[in-house]
Each structure stands twice: as C-alpha cells, then as structure tokens.
Amino acid sequence: MHTKIFHIVFLSIFICAINTSVYSQDLKPKKQSLQIDSQPNTTPKTVDTVMDSTAVKKQDSLIKKPPLLDGIVYRKAKDYEKLDQKKKQLTLYNEAEIKYLDFELTAGKIVYDFAKGEIYAGRLKDSLGNYSQNPVFKQGDDVIEPDSIRYNTKSRKAMVWNSRTQQSEFRIKAEVSKKQNDSVYFMQNVRFTTAKDIENPEYYFKTRKIKFVPNKKVVTGVTNMVIADVPTPIGLPFAFFPMSKQAESGFIIPTFGDTNQQGYYIQNGGYYFAISDKLDLNVLGDYYTNGSYALRAESSYAQRYKYSGRVNVRYENQIFSELGLPDYQRSTQYNIQWSHTQDQKSNPSSRFSASVNLGSGQYFTQSLNNNNIGSRLNNQMNSSVTYSKTFESVPQVNMTLGATHSQTTGDQSIINMTLPTLQLSVDRVYPFSKEGAAKKGFIKNINLSYNLRGENRVNTTEEKFFKSEMFDDLNTGIQHSIPITTNFKVFKHFSVSTGASYNEVWYMNTVEKNFDLNENQVVTTRVNGFDSFRTYNVNANIGTTIYGTFNFNKDSKLQAIRHLMTPKIGYTYSPSFEKYYDTYAIDALGTTMADYTRFETGIFGSPGKSYSNIVTFGLGNSFEAKVRDDESETGEPKKIMLLSNLNFSTSYDISADSLAWAPLVISGGTTVLNDQMNINFGATLDPYAIDNNGRRMDMFNIDNGGSLFRMTSANMTVGWSFSSKDALFGNENNSKDRANEQNVLNGGRPDDLFGRATDLGDNRQTLFDDDEDDGDRAFGGFYNAKLPWDLVFAYSLTYGNRNRESEITNNSVMVSGNVEITPKWKFGFSSGYDFANKGVTFTQLRFERDLMSWRMNFSWVPLGDYTSWGFFIGIKSSMLSDLKWEKKSVPDKRYRN
C-alpha cells in the first residue's frame, strides 16, 4: 500500500469520526507517520461585545471535540501494514514496531485499535510450532519482554502475559502482570532471581503475588526459595526489596560464629549511610561473648575528574582469657588508613595525594577480624601526605608541603615522623646566557639554583605517640643550599662537569655535653634555641662512553656482541669546619678531653671536623647481543640484552693517613625470558685485612696472605612472574599485574607470595583476581580445554663474611600460583622453603568454585603459627549478600605484655 494513499484514507476516517472541521495538513509520502492536531482550533475573532442566543449557538457548533490521537504515531513492519476501516484497527506484521508518545513497542505482530486506544502485541508462530519475535515494551527506563501484551494508551494501563524485566540486579518473570499506572505493577505467579538466565536460573524465589514499583521497591507475599528447580524449606511470609538506582542507607546484617579464645561472636553488623552519590559511610561493629568488641568506620568519596579516596578507621578492645586468671590480658588496638588520589588533569599546577597506614604496632597480628598474612609478616607501616604547587614564574618555583610516618611493627613499635616537611626549589638560572640562546662552553653553561628544606622530625614510641612527651622531643631544622654547576666537553669525547655548593643549616635544638660529678658520667643536655652553621664544597667529574662490538660469522645464529662502557672519575673537596667543635671532660679530673659538636643530633647532619679530599672511580657496563631472526621479513637481526648493567665503584681519600681505599662495590642486573625474569646481584670487596677482633687493619689483604680482595657480603635475588597468556608460551601477552589492593594498603606485598588478604567477616569477594565474566568462558571438552594459570617465583640469597664468619644468612625460595582446573574451578597456592633455617615458609591453599550466581571458596593455612581454614558459600549479588553459609577456624592470637 502506498504511504500517500494510506494517509489520505486514514485521515478521512478520523474526519468522519470526530464530525468536525480539521485544518488541512501536508501529507508527505516519504514520512511514515500519523498526526492529529491535539489542540482545538481557536474560535473566530469578533469585535462584538454583546451577542444574541443565535450567535452563541452558532459559535458553539464550531468548537472542536478532543482528537482520537494525542501525538504522532510512528510505525513500521517488514511484511505488511493493514488498515481495517470498519474495525478501526491497524495491523503490523513481522518485525513490527510502533512508537507513540513516551513508549516504544516491537513484536512479531501488533494490532492498534485507535477507536479504543488499545494496542495488542504478540509473537509469531512458525509451521513447526516455535515462537519468535517476543514483544519488547519500553517506557522511559522500564523494559518488559513478555509473550504478549495489551496496552491502553489513554489510561496507560496494561495486561502482560509471561513478562520478563530487570530491575537493578534482579531479573523478574511473572505469568500475569497488570500495569496499574506508570509507577505500580501487580504480578501473579512470579519468580525473581539474580541469575543471568531467567528462563533457566540456578536458583530463584517463587511467590504468588508481587507489588512492583520500578526503581523503588518490590513487595512480595509468601516467598519460597527454589534451588535447581527443587523447593527448599527456606521461605518468608513476606519480603521487601529496595530497588533504587542510587545507594540507599540501611542496616547491615551481621555474621555469626565462634573462636577458641573469644567465644561466640557477632561480626560486621552495622549501618550503611548513603550520604550522597559522592560520599558514603559504613559503620560496623563486632562483639564477642568474652567481652571483646571492635568498631570500624569505612568511607569512600569521589568527585569525577577531580579526586577519589577511601578512609578506614578501626578500633578493637581485645580480652584474652578470664578475669582473675594468671594469663588474663586486655589490650586496645587501632589502625587508620587513608588513600587519596587526584586526577592529573584537574589541576596540573597543584597536586595533593595521601597514603596513610598508621596505628598500633600489633594490629595486624592481633586483629580479631582480619586475616592478612602479608601484613603480619611485614615489619613496617609507612604513611605520606603531600601537597605540591608549581608557580609559573621566571624562574619557575616548586613548593612541596608534606608529612611522613614510618613505624616498625611488633612489641616495641618505634615511630619516626616528619610533621611537616617544607621543600622549596627555584629552577636553574643561567646568568651568562641569553634566554633561548644555545648554551655552549664553560661560561654559558654556568647555572645556579636555590633549594630550601624545613622539617619538624621526631623519633618516639607508640606509648608517646601524639602526646605532650612526643612534642618535647621534636627536632626542627631548615636547610638552605645553593648549587652552582657547569659542564663542557674536552677532546670532543670527554664530558666534564664542575660545581660548588654552599649550604647553611638552621637548628632550633642543639646539645651540650658536660661531665656530671654527682652521677660520675657524661650528661648530654638538650638546648632549645636558634643556632646555625655553614659549609661548602667543590666537585668535578669527567666521563666518557666507549663502544665495543665483537662481530661473528654472519651465517651463525649469534652475529655480534656489543659492549658499552661508561667510565667516570670524580673529585670532591670539603674543608675542615672544626670551629663548630667543642671539648668536654670524660673523667672527673678533667684531664681527658673529647671533641663534639653541638649539632651532632641535628636532622640534617653536622659539619665535618676533618677536611675531605676524595677521588671516586666508577665503571658501568652493559652487554647486548645481535642474533639472526629467522621470522623477520626484513632480515634485520634481533637485539637481546645479555646484561643490563654491571657497575663497579670505589673511592680513594687523599687526605687519609690510613685505610684510604674504600671497599669495591659491585652491582648488576638483567632480565631474561622475554623480560619476565629479573636477576639482580651485588657484592662488596674489601682490599684491607682484618685483625682477630674483626677491625680493619692498615694492611692490604694480599699482603696478609690472603687474596686481592676480601668479600665481606654478597646477595642475589631472582623474580619470575609468568602465566599461560604470556608470549613465552605462544599466546598473546595480555596478562595483567595481579595486585591485592587491600594487602598493599595494609603494608603487605602486591602479589600473593605471602597469601591473599582475607576479611574474616566478609567472604563474598573472590580469592582470585579474574574478571567476573571469566567464569562464563565456554568449556571446550577435556582434551582441548585451555587451563589458564599464572605463577610467581622469588628467590633470595644473602652471604655475610664481615668478621670471617663466612655464612649464608638468608637462602629462601617462595612461589605462588593460580590455575583454572576447569572454567568453573580455580585453585591457588602460596608456599616456600627457607634453606638457611631449614623450614617451610608460610603456606596457603585456595580453592574456589564459580556457581554462576553463587560463589563457593575454601582457604586453608595448614602449617605454622597462623594455622586456619575457612569455608564460604553464598550469593554474589550485594542485594542478597546475607544469603550465605560460612564456617571458619581462625588462628589463635599470641598476646604479649
């Protein structure tokens, strides 16, 4: 049927039906739409102020009746469009589509009764009895996929059969649904689930009646849980599920269990505050029947394109044993974590970042709610808060204001803090060179800059942390430095750099030493007040680069080896600043005196008493091979790094009367196996011999009957991280770095060599790093199935021979790996062996089964002080996270006074 003829006939029907005048409209044949003017025609204008009854009746007869349609009707069909003038129905067949007002409808067949304002839509049935092209009804953000639907465009009510819809994480299917209005649906014989396949879900909830308010709530009657089409005794007389696209505040259901030392417990119960879409707060608590308790506050915040961060505050009151027993212990532990990251594009000239991890030294070893082995084995917690600002002046000025924290863990926790640190640097200035001009030669390359560093630094203990005693020990200092440098070339191939540096240090705290006759010992007294000293030094360096190539037969696999050497000689001179030194008596008679400087405890060091006249020597090496590449289309050889670096360094003190040579330090490293294995090594060689007490003598070791050098220490580390996705094994190298974010934030390792961090109160998170969709990978059979795996290997060796002990102090190997036995089964392990102490290191076994909508995992630590295990099975969805079962045995704590 031609579009133009269709429009003319359709409009003529409406003109007869409404029995009134309609303004003529242009009918465009190429536009498949239907429009009836929804606004009544305006009455003719008149200038009469008084009208008789005849005129009024005549005018009333011209008033338009409401139109049958309120807007444009867009329609489309693949096979045909049929207009029944008698029944006032429009039929669209095969891939039918209709758009009217705020809804869209696609189906195999659509019938529009424009007299009643109702739309009927259904499926198509082929010759074999199979149905296809189910209706899809869209109105706003709501999408319904039924078998058939009946919709009234005027009342906006609908009847839907076998509807399917998704709200948040829920997928809902109902035999009969009634759309009461735009915001309320009533459903009968309903199943709802978080499974991806609503037609064949692994579990679902079955109920007879539901009241459904899109994006707000679902209220059900008697509800029963069905697993694998088998009804279970799990049910509720009624249920309420919030359905908001935004986070909603609400209570958090706790978990229950028991421990050997604290008894029964309730963990991770609390309240979630959805403050805004940029900020939330999670307040949790634990309680144990022996009186122990814990409180935690967790908050995340984010401003798109500006910053994001996370704050965790944890406090625990721990009780061990029973009051009155000799082993009764009570302690408090706390931990504060804060991470803040600023978007680099938000403000390039101003940056703020934070990484804070501070608290009790024994928090991670004694925490009742966190089983983080990596943090337990870590012996240090570090924090840093930094604000930096760049002033775009000439010269450019950079300012950094920060605070740092370093804390040892264990029984005696030592804390080092800088609060705050101010750094200011002025960019280089070339006084003898014009701006933009080439800088060549000694004079034009002369440049100077200015650096300032001010600090408040304190060393304290956990007992004095942020108490008045801590601030009594605060040391304050400001350091100014003005370096002047220049560089030039000699004999074309030698680069020479010379410079001088002026330093001035201001201290607000110094010391004074005197002999106390009452105590019969030397007493060091802290003196508060301003004091300063000034130093300077000069330096010069000369170096060059030497290339050497050893060529081989062009037909051989190895074609050449390239050797790169960078020799360097340096000289540093610093005069004596003995004017800053004083003497004090070290005996009661005062006959024996000793030298000291009042600046010896300063945070930026103290001036040197003896002058320094040192020559340094350094040699860097790297080795690279060229091998024939048979796969190259151009025939170019392939470069392979044999040794990334091999460095030698030592120094000679011209002014020293004895022991002028410093030990020779050797360091090197390389990467092999397609840069997947890192190998680093180092050694220290001393040219001097030692006496029976282990002190260096002014005698070369070779003159004492030994070798040219005496090895005092050596070390080697090997790290190897690879997986089935790496190119080494014939696949594309798209492996990702495996990182445990919480483990790193706690101070542990980013890998799982020390196991995976486990929250004992929340096992919903996977023990592995794979994406959620990895479990849906198709299984190709037992003989052609791929087994994705990854492996991390670490080896460390340390040798010590400072006092002729000649022993290996550390010799250990650690390995961790993960493998997908099947697309749904995963297995991981972490273990190692200490050859020096002859024992197995920390060992953890991890198993996990992906049950589609569910997750089951088992973690086991079979050996050592942290023996424990944990089993969990539960629904992945956060909306139904309380539907779970778990059982665990936590490691016993070892309390210390």
Image (cartoon, rainbow, N blue to C red):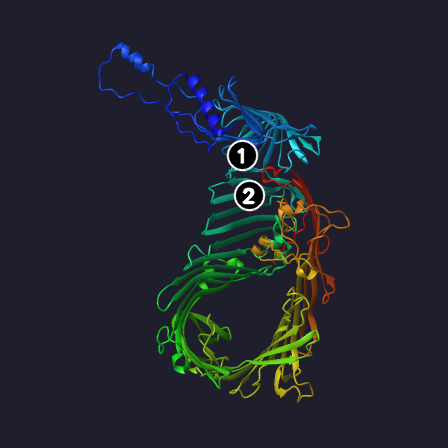
Q: Is residue 79 shown to the viewer in this render? A: yes
- Residue 367 appears at what percent x and percent y? 61, 51
Q: Is residue 209 left or right of residue 778?
A: left
Name the residue beneath numbered marker 1: 243
Q: Quadrant of residue 224?
A: top right
Task: Assign a secondary structure to mark 1.
Answer: loop
Write the residue at 49% across / 29% down: 3
Residue 772 vs 584, above or below: the answer is above
The amino acid at mark 1 is Met
Q: Nearer the viewer, residue 718 or 103?
A: 103
- Residue 809 appears at what percent x and percent y? 68, 70
Q: Nearer the viewer, mark 2 or mark 1?
A: 1
In the picture, the disc for residue 391 is none
**For the residue carrying disc 2, how many other residues have a C-alpha within 10 Å: few (<14), some (14-19), or many (20+)?**
many
Q: Nearer the viewer, residue 394 or 281?
A: 394
Write the residue at 57% across / 84% down: 661
N-terminal of the pair, mark 2 or mark 1, is: 1
Task: Assign a secondary structure to mark 2.
Answer: strand
Alpha carbons under labels 2 and 1: distance apart: 23 Å
Q: Residue furthest top?
A: 53
The amino acid at mark 2 is Leu
Residue 697 vs 510, above or below: the answer is below
Q: Is residue 223 shown to the viewer in this render? A: no
- Residue 833 appears at what percent x and percent y? 72, 62
Q: Is residue 54 left or right of residue 318?
A: left
In the picture, the disc for residue 284 is 2
Q: Nearer the viewer, residue 757 or 48?
A: 48
